[in-house]
Structures are given as C-alpha cells and as structure tokens.
Image: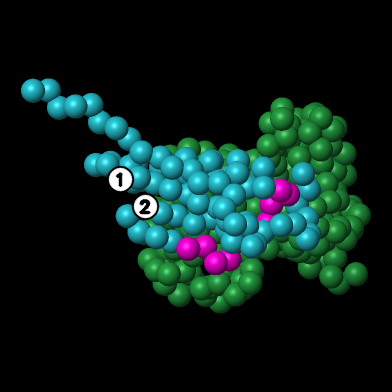
Chain colours: A cyan, B green
Amino acid sequence: MPYGRNDLPRFFFHIDDHIHEIDDEGQEFADAAAARVQAIIYAGELLRDDPGLVWDGQRLEVRVTDEAGMPVIAVQITAVDAEPEA
Amino acid sequence: MIELESSLMLLARKLSKHVVLDPDDRTALLDLPYMRRTLDPSTYLLREGDSPQYCSILMSGFAYRQKLTGDGARQIVSLHIPGEALDLQSLYLDTADHNIQTLTRAEVALVPREAMRELIRARPSIAQAVMIEILVEGSIGREWALNIGRRNAQTRLAHLLCEVAMRLDAQGLPTDGGYELPMTQEQLGDALGLTAVHVNRTLKTLEAKGLIVRDRRHIGIPRWTGLRDVGDFTGRYLHLGRQTG
C-alpha cells in the first residue's frame, strides 16, 4: 500500500500491565481488522523487548479502542509456570 | 547553472572526505554530463528488476531503498541524504535487486552509467573513493541488520536517529542540535522492522526521557551523549574521515 492515505479511522492502543498507559494520540488504519492485526503484532514486540512483562503471574494487555472509545480488541498474554516439584 | 555546479560539488565533497582528490580529479568529476530532475515524494528512481541506465546523485531531499516480500510487506533497507550517490552498485551490476524511491520532494542529477564508469577508469583516486563509498554502504547495511535483528525498539530507534544526525553533520548539512526527519511513523516502522504503533510509543518514551524533542517532523537532540548511549551508537561503522589505504 502507498504511504500517505488520508481520512482513515483512528484507533488507540492502550497498555495494561503493572502500569496503565493510555494512548491519547492514536493512529490511522484502513479498518478495525487492520488495527486488530497490528495490536497482536505490537503485543509481540513489547514482549520481545521485555519478556519480564509476563513473569511471575503478570499479565500484558494491549487494548484497542476506536474513536468513539468502543473496544476493538484486547490482546492478553500470560505465562504459566510449571508447578514446582514437591 | 551555478546551482548545478554546486550540486555535483556535494558529491565531490563527499568523495574527497574519503581520499585526496587532486584538482584534475575534481574537474573531471564536475565535468560529468548529467540531467537534472525534480521529483515528487515517493517517485521511483529504480525498480527491482530494472537495468539501471543512470547513476543518480541526490542533490536535495531524502531518498530510501526498499525491498518487498512476496506478499508485499515493505522493508526500508537504507536512507540517503543530499550529496550521496544512490546506486553506485548499479554501475557494475546489471539488474537492480531493490527499489529506490524519494522520501521527500527531491532534486537528482542523473549521470549516464557509462560516463561514470569512464571517469572511474580514468581517475584512480575517484575509483578508490567510489570503492570506499560502496564499502561504507555495505557497512551501514551490516549495522542495520544488527540493529533490526538484535536491538530492542528504543535502542533501535535511538540508533537510527543518531546515525542520521551524524551523517548529515559529516556531509556539512546543518543539524543545529537536531534535524528535520521527513518520515512518517509508518515509514520509520518499515525502516526499523516495527509496527507504527510501537514507533509512536517509543518516540514518546525517548521524549519523556528528555533525549529528543519533537516538533512535527523535527527531531531535536538536546543531549547527544544520552541518545548515543541509549542507541548503543558509535560512528565507527560510518568510516568518516580519510582512509589512508
């Protein structure tokens, strides 16, 4: 796709892990389906940068909302450790 | 035609940073035939599979090289600033293996491929400078592979911002504690192998740390050493300065 498309819907990508980060700027995507895919890849990028985000029972959540503030997708990632051996 | 002269002067200046060019070398370089073109943003200068006819030299504006995967995902593989020749490898390779596009409105000088090759055959110092330029491009490509393959997003972005600053500065273009980076967040993402969403967040993080100041596309760098450290950046791979060879 060429760069520089105009008048596309805007989506907001919030992060919830041990901190809450509200995205008040947002980014344009062709449609909600494109924003969903980006949210999943974005969550993967955050994990790659910092695998510790899901250690010790912590959860990473990337939550996307549309211009009306309605939810579009929530990507939730947790890691489950094996039970320690008795 | 003074502007045209000063434009090939940019290339002469760049090449003479690598090796000593004597007055005859400079004259021969400035006497190269060329056509001048003003191009809109996103204009293709070369497409993968093409047979290059010209060696294009960027006189003003920014350009980039990109490659596409089979299903159309784009990777920007290099950025180019004024004074740089855009496809020196095409002097000797018959088929383009990547695409070259303008990033901004740009002026280019198109030097016929054969004229450039003839100059290189005739002038050993220019040949050496062109060889060094091609080697430095390869070195920058290796650094980009390391950057994209093994550094986290913050370091990756800081590294790119440092590289552009140092290259502009070395080319004698005004940086003044910052520069205009004419890239969208999507394009930065394509250069860094990141989603535009992550680029956006990472820019905000660097700004919150006081390492950059953003004003539209202008990137201010208030603390060079801070950005350099976060970006794991040294300029060694740029091989600035004269190579004694």
The residues tagged by marks 2 and 1 sit, at their Cα atoms, a distance apart of: 7 Å
Residue A7 vs B145, above or below: the answer is below
Q: Are the residues at dot 2 and dot 1 in contact (C-beta closer than 8 Å)? A: yes
Query: In the rendering, at what x and y percent does residue B176 appear?
Result: 56, 76
Q: What label sits on residue B179 in the rendered view? A: none
Q: Could you tell whether A11 is left or right of A79 in the image?
A: right
| Quadrant, the C terminus of chain A | top left
Q: Is residue B219 above or below residue B48?
A: below
Residue of label 2: A17
Chain of the residue under the numbered disc 1 shown in the image: A
Q: Earlier in the sequence, mark 2 or mark 1?
A: 2
Q: What residue sits right under mark 1 in the picture?
A: A58
Dot 1 amino acid type: Gln
Which amino acid type is marked by label 2?
Answer: Asp
Classify residue B184 by image quadrant. bottom right
Estimate how packed mark 1 is, as few (under 14), some (14 to 19) or many (20 or more) residues with alpha carbons within 10 Å: some
Q: Extreme left residue here?
A: A86
Residue shown at 78% from the left, 55% from the top: A5
Q: Residue B10, image x and y in percent?
A: 72, 62
Q: Which residues are magenta?
A: A22-31
Residue at image coords 67%, 47%: A32
Residue A45 in sight from this viewpoint: no
Mark 2: secondary structure: loop
From the viewer's side, name the closer residue of B15 and B75.
B75
